Image (tube, grey):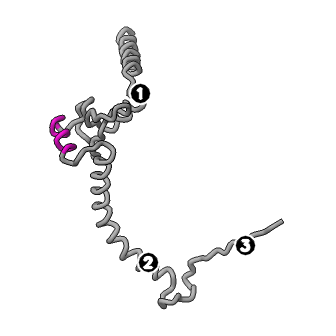
């Protein structure tokens, strides 16, 4: 039987200093402090870049097209007419034809995807909800 030995290194406050003259924990803390500021500024820039890239790559839309569509819809979801709550509206598109249909809130977008964009399933769900509402009123 073969055994393997795994070397485990611990960050020990009493560890000897490395080549820079500082113990590991001090060097790491200083490095993290300098990086933290850089990451915060890059994060916002990266998110904006990523949004633009996703619109262009997935939907062949520019940010101006998105803004135009949003203003056409009055700044609200195309289904429930609710304004977005903290997040941007999602671009709804037909998966079969790759056509953008509108902008939806997260709830409506997930709801449509759960029904597989199938009008028949959506109408069956609507009938189910109506029957349940009528039963509740009848009792």
x 29%, y 60%: residue: 44
Q: Which mark is first along the chain, 1 or 2? A: 2
Q: Position of residue 76 (x, y in %)?
A: 21, 36
Q: Which mark is first along the chain, 3 or 2? A: 3
- Figure check: 85 above or below 138: below
Few, some or many C-alpha atoms within 10 Å of disc 3 (few <14, some 14-19, many ≥20)? few
In front of the other: 12 or 44: 44
The residue tagged 3 is 5
x 41%, y 27%: residue: 115
Task: For mark 1, give the secondary structure.
Answer: loop
The residue tagged 1 is 115
The residue tagged 2 is 29
State which quadrant residue 45 falls in: bottom left
Residue range highlighted in magenta = 65-74
Q: Position of residue 51 (x, y in %)?
A: 29, 51
In the rendered view, does 8 fall on the left or right side of 82? right
Q: Position of residue 89 (x, y in %)?
A: 27, 41
Q: Position of residue 1 (x, y in %)?
A: 84, 65
- Residues at marks 2 and 1, CA–CA distance in whole angstroms: 50 Å
In the rendered view, does 12 fall on the left or right side of 113? right
- Residues at marks 2 and 3, CA–CA distance in whole angstroms: 30 Å
Q: Nearer the viewer, mark 2 or mark 3?
A: 3
In front of the other: 101 or 34: 101
Q: Number of numbered discs present?
A: 3
x 57%, y 80%: residue: 12
């Amino acid at each position: 039987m073969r055994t393997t030995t795994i070397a485990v290194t611990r960050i020990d406050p009493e560890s000897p200093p490395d080549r820079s003259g500082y113990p590991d924990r001090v060097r790491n803390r200083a490095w993290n402090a300098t990086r933290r500021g850089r990451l915060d500024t890059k994060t916002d820039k990266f998110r904006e870049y990523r949004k633009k890239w996703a619109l262009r790559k997935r939907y062949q839309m520019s940010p101006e097209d998105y803004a135009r569509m949003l203003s056409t819809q009055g700044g609200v979801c195309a289904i429930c007419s609710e304004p977005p709550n903290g997040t941007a509206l999602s671009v709804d598109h037909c998966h079969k034809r790759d056509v953008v249909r509108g902008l939806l809130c997260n709830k409506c977008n997930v709801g449509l995807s759960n029904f597989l964009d199938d009008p028949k399933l959506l109408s069956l769900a609507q009938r189910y909800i109506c029957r349940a509402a009528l039963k509740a009123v009848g009792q």
